[in-house]
Image (tube, rainbow, N blue to C red):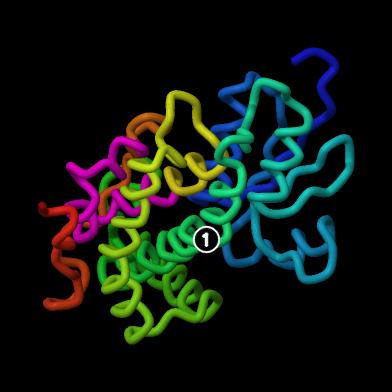
Amino acid sequence: MSDQPKLVLHKVPFSHPCLAVEAVLDRHGLEYETVDMVSGTHGDTVEGIYGEGNRTVPGLLVDDEPVHGTTAIFEKLDELVDEADLYPGAVAAAIREAERGIAEELQTAGRTLVFGALHFRPEALGTFAGAGPLDPAGTDFAIKLARGAWRYIGITAVSLAADLAKLPEQLDIVDELIEGGVVGGDEPTAVDYQIGSSLHLLMQIGDVRPLIEGRPAQKLVDSWFERGPADIPAGAFPAGWVPERSAQSAA
């Protein structure tokens, strides 16, 4: 894209919403700078740039204009790049409904289930950087990080078990969107990126991966995202917390 505005992406490591935005920027050949912040301590910095109450990532500066949040960034990129077509007319209303519904639910699930699993297997944090499990000193750091995330996000054992229980039904909704042509077409839309990035993260949890594998939702991940290096081993969650595949997906 010639004469593009200056783009600066504020992100934190391993963030699936940030991954979704990067996927759009990369697919359309946009040049951009990244500012990597420390997860859990970035809220004040983000709020200072993007305005009161905006404490999460991603945030994108477009020629110094602050654009905050995945959907707002996608809408801005859709204006800037003619061929992006993130909200194609025929399914635009359905895409926006999915953004407000299942995409937002899975974005939350990705965040809570990963940090939930890391609470039980903190040494697995090292695999997110493409390395092996952490040594004892690194595991001490990971334990502190997981505890901080539980406090910051508001995770409890009760809410974690509830989020796991909801996942099969949420995946059924994704499969229905794919079958209905709203998601999973030849060219990715805004909701492809948003749902796909969340499922990409969830597939790095060994307990959750079998719920996604072999169904249309997995193809959505594989179409637009490379398989991530992380692996939180199966058995991280206590016995009985991980649900069975839904009857719909097993049929």
Residue drawn at (63%, 48%), measured in percent from left and top? 11
Dot 1, how many residues are within 10 Å of its Cα: few (below 14), some (14-19), or many (20+)? some
Q: Say which residue label 1 marks.
A: 104
Q: Main secondary structure of the magenta part?
A: helix
Say how many tags the image has: 1
Residue drawn at (48%, 40%), measured in percent from left and top? 192
249 over 243 or under it: above or below: above
Looking at the picture, how far across and down is residue 170, in whole percent?
A: 34, 61
- Give the residues in magenta: 198-221
Residue drawn at (83%, 56%), measured in percent from left and top? 49
238 over 247 or under it: above or below: below
Question: Is 162 part of what is drawn in magenta?
Answer: no
Looking at the picture, how far across and down is residue 53, in whole percent?
A: 77, 71
Residue type highlighted by circle 1: Glu
Residue drawn at (72%, 49%), measured in percent from left and top? 72
- Residue furthest to the top: 2
Looking at the picture, how far across and down is residue 178, in whole percent?
A: 37, 42
Q: Is residue 157 left or right of residue 36?
A: left
